[in-house]
Each structure stands twice: as structure tokens, then as C-alpha cells.
Image: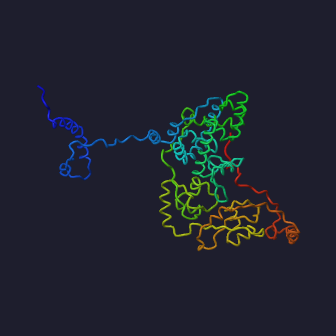
């Protein structure tokens, strides 16, 4: 005889099993409920439905593997190593350059110390774009991570953009700012350019060669090998490249090898925390560079290391202009700014309308010294300004609080030329000055200093700012 099982019994067993499974979870929830009285939890009403609807429950998924990798490392070096993706090169040039670096620990220490300010940002930007992380080491080759580096070809900044290429990638260059030196703008432009080159050639080694040599040069080298029935990979094109480009990828490989295993080369790398070093702060109005550094409680050199794009003693620009500060100093900046009662900027602009406006006469007019005007505008000694030039001069009154207009900034130019030798025709008092000099009087006592004009010195091309080549 077949026994009929009541419907309630059919559901009873699964329900009991489900409640048994949920019991530890419910108990844990009761134990972890903050501030919840035990009696309240015990008397909580049961759900009306005998069987909870679990179809809508969502199971928390683990974070993406890439995110885990990015923050699993204790320092940025490990993060870079984990993202190597460019095929390795192994030849005599790699060995040569690795040996050069390994025998110069002081150079490595200086370069990596500078790199510690920027590497987290560069690596983060590379990972966002899905690009090989060893590209973060490229400024090691380009500029030794010096954002003020300037080459003999007028390539500037950490990523060494020449003026034309910089403009192609929207890096602003004017009398007040050179974004080829800016950390954020130049990094964004460099990675955009490298990605474009990779899309063009489909090969990271060729993309790097094009970054150094130019895409047109690499394209011509490829066509030449194709016409000759030869391969078109980097090694096969090397004979067609100039020495600098031929060594470019091996140099990067040498640095990759050192970062991968510094102990093998007898070197040690400084630990760089795997966290942001700096943050961007909005600039609300024109502010003197020295005032900004003071409010952030930084030295001027420390401030300039993060903000090398500003060429003048005052930071101007619209609301898009950002100031980079270490995270802890950004908090100090905001606090000190809220309590600041003096003028933020002590500079304004003046347009030269006549050749008669000498630096000396301008200094007298604006109650300062010629040297202050020369330094503020990077005007070499023994040179004169041409009409039409726009220069910075001190504000005459504290009541002049308005910012320098953007149209002035965008259209400002400055030209100067070497002082011309003073002639009798140009200055009738020349003979008198000459006679006084012969009489043994000081040159300064005469109206004309009888000294030869020196060749202007361009501070931007000083050897200390040129990038290191070897």
C-alpha cells in the first residue's frame, strides 16, 4: 500500500535544511549588530513567507585582478616589475649600458630619488591605459627624471618634448608657462604619443624608436628593408638608425634589468611607497610662487620640483591651472591660505612701447632694481628689450588686486637684443666720459660706462639643465 505524504511534510524538510544553513549567518549577524539589545534581536518578527526568496541575493565579487596587483605590492618598483610587457632585448649594447649604470651608484641614487616624486603617478596612468609598466622607466633614459632638463635640440622636461611636438599634443608654451615641464600635462602627452606610435607600428620596440627618432624616420627605414626583402623588426632596422636610436631600446632594457634585480648589479633602489606622493590643488587667483611655497610650508626648490612648468615668479592662469603639492602639505596650504591676510601676488605686467624704456628706467619707475626685473623675466645681462615686449613688474599699490588678464597672458611676447656700443653720434657726452676715464676717474663716475658689451647668455641653455647623455 502506498503511503501519501502530506504537502506540509514536503516543504518541511527543505525548510529545515535551509534554516539550518542560515542559522550560523543569523547568529553572526546578531553578534555583530552594533548597539542592538539582545531582547530586541531575539524578538524580531520572522518573515511572513515561510521560504525566503534567495533569487535576488547578490554575491560580492572579488576586486579585479589588476587592481589587486596594483596595490598588493609594498612599493612602486614591485608594481613596475609585475607589469613588464615589452619583449626583452639581449645583446652587447644592453650589457654595455647595464655595466655603465652599475658602476655609477651615485647617479642611480640621484635619479631614483627624483623619480620617487613622480613614479606612482606615471605607473598609475600606464595601468589605466593598459600599457606596459616599464615605460615608466623611460624618463630614466630621456632626462634622468629631471623635469627641468633641456637638450641641445631644445627638448624640454621629463619626457623631452621638442617645441613642435609639444604643441601637437596641446602642451602650452608661452612667456609664463611651459607645460612640456609640467608633471601631469607632459606625462599625459607622452603616454598618448607612445600609444599612438604603438598603434601605428604594432610593436613597442619600434614605437620607442619612433619616439626617439620620429615616426617618419622609422617608416622610411621599414620601407627600405621591405624593398630589400629584409625583416622590419627593431634589430633588423638598427643598422639604418642613428647611434642614439640604436642604443635607445638597449638602454631601457638595461634599466629594466636593474629594476628587476638590483642586487645582481650590486645596486639598491630606494623604497618608494605604493601610494600617491602628490595631489592637485586648485589655484583660485594669481599667486606668487614664493607665497605658494610658503603657504604649503615647502622650500622653493621643493615646490618647483612638483611645479616646474611655471617660468615666472607669479603663477597665473584660469581655473584649470593646478598646483601640485605633497598630500600632507596640501592640507597645510588650505589652512594657511584661509588665514592669509596679505596680497597673494605682488606682480603685474607692463608692455614696452618704446626703445627708450630701458631696464634702468623701468626699475626706477616701478621702485625696484634692474636686477629684480631681469631675474623676474629671465633677461640676460647687457641686453635691451624690444618694443612690444610684455614683462613682469612689481605692483605699485596693494590696491591693485586684480589678476593678470588671460588675453595678456595668451598674447604676451618678449624679445631682447644685445646692447649696442655707445658712439659719439649717439651720445654727444661720449668725449667727456672718455676724458674723465683718462684722467683716472672711476668708470662709474662718468655718464657712460666704457665697457664692451658681452655676448648675451641664455640661461635656458646652461649645461646644468642639459640632459645627461652617455
Front residue (pair 18, 461) = 18
Q: Residue furthest front?
A: 1
At x 84%, y 63%, the residue is 421
Q: Residue at x 70, y 27 (%)?
A: 230
Residue 302 appears at what percent x and percent y?
57, 54
- In front: 46, or 210? 46
- Above or below residue 357? Residue 140 is above
User: In which quadrant will I find the C terminus?
Assistant: top right
The x and y percentages for residue 48 are 20, 47
Q: Is residue 415 above or below residue 120?
A: below
* Relative horizontal placement of residue 32, taking residue 90 as reference (left or right): left
Instruction: Point out the image quarter for the N terminus.
Output: top left
Residue at the image position 49 percent from the left and 49 percent from the top: 276
Count of all numbered marks drawn on residues in the image = 0
Q: How is the image coloured?
A: rainbow
Q: Please state if 110 lies on the left or on the right of 79 as rendered.
A: right
Q: Quadrant of residue 232?
A: top right
The percent coordinates of residue 402 (x first, y second) are: 59, 70
Front in this rendered view, residue 193 or 15: 15
Residue 88's spot in the image, x, y percent?
A: 59, 31
In the rendered view, does 399 fall on the left or right side of 440? left
In this picture, is 64 found above or below 172?
above
Q: Is residue 448 above or below residue 110?
A: below
The part of the image, by quadrant, that contains residue 258 is top right
The furthest residue to the left = 1
Amino acid at each position: 500500500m502506498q503511503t501519501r505524504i502530506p504537502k506540509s511534510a514536503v516543504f518541511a524538510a527543505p525548510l529545515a535544511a535551509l534554516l539550518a544553513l542560515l542559522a550560523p549567518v543569523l547568529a553572526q549577524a546578531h553578534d555583530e549588530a552594533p548597539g542592538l539589545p539582545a531582547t530586541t534581536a531575539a524578538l524580531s518578527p520572522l518573515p511572513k513567507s515561510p521560504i525566503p526568496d534567495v533569487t535576488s541575493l547578490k554575491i560580492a565579487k572579488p576586486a579585479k585582478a589588476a587592481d589587486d596587483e596594483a596595490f598588493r605590492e609594498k612599493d612602486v618598483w614591485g608594481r613596475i616589475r609585475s607589469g613588464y610587457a615589452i619583449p626583452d632585448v639581449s645583446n652587447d649594447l644592453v650589457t654595455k649600458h647595464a655595466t655603465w649604470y652599475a658602476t655609477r651608484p651615485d647617479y642611480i641614487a640621484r635619479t631614483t630619488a627624483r623619480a620617487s616624486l613622480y613614479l606612482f603617478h606615471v605607473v598609475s596612468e600606464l595601468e589605466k591605459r593598459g600599457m606596459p609598466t616599464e615605460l615608466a622607466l623611460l624618463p630614466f633614459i630621456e632626462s634622468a627624471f629631471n623635469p627641468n632638463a633641456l637638450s641641445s635640440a631644445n627638448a624640454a622636461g621629463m619626457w623631452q618634448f621638442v617645441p613642435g611636438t609639444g604643441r601637437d599634443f596641446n602642451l602650452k608654451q608661452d612667456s609664463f608657462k611651459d607645460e612640456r615641464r609640467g608633471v601631469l600635462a607632459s606625462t599625459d602627452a607622452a603616454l598618448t604619443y607612445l600609444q599612438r606610435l604603438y598603434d601605428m607600428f604594432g610593436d613597442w620596440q619600434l614605437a620607442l624608436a619612433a619616439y626617439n627618432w620620429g615616426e617618419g624616420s622609422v617608416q622610411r627605414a621599414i620601407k627600405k628593408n621591405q624593398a630589400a626583402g629584409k625583416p622590419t623588426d627593431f634589430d633588423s632596422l638598427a643598422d639604418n638608425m642613428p647611434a642614439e636610436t640604436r642604443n635607445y631600446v638597449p638602454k631601457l632594457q638595461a634599466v629594466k634589468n636593474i629594476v628587476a634585480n638590483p642586487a645582481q648589479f650590486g645596486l639598491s633602489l630606494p623604497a618608494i611607497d605604493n601610494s600617491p606622493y602628490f595631489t592637485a590643488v586648485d589655484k583660485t587667483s594669481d599667486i606668487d610662487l614664493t607665497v605658494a611655497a610658503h603657504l604649503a610650508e615647502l622650500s622653493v626648490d621643493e615646490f618647483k620640483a612638483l611645479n616646474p612648468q611655471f617660468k615666472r615668479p607669479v603663477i597665473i592662469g584660469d581655473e584649470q591651472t593646478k598646483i601640485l603639492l605633497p598630500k600632507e602639505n596640501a592640507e597645510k596650504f588650505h589652512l594657511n591660505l584661509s588665514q592669509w591676510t596679505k596680497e597673494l601676488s605682488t606682480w603685474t605686467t607692463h608692455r614696452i612701447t618704446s626703445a627708450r624704456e630701458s631696464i634702468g628706467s623701468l626699475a626706477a619707475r616701478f621702485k625696484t632694481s634692474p636686477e629684480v626685473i631681469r631675474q623676474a623675466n629671465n633677461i640676460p645681462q647687457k641686453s635691451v628689450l624690444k618694443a612690444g615686449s610684455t614683462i613682469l613688474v612689481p605692483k605699485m599699490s596693494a590696491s591693485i588686486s586684480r589678476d593678470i588678464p588671460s588675453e595678456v597672458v595668451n598674447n604676451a611676447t618678449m624679445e631682447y637684443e644685445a646692447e649696442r656700443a655707445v658712439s659719439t653720434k649717439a651720445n654727444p657726452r661720449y668725449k667727456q666720459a672718455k676724458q674723465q676715464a683718462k684722467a683716472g676717474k672711476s668708470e662709474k663716475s662718468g655718464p657712460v660706462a666704457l665697457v664692451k658689451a658681452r655676448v648675451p647668455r641664455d640661461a635656458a641653455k646652461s649645461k646644468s639643465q642639459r640632459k645627461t647623455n652617455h
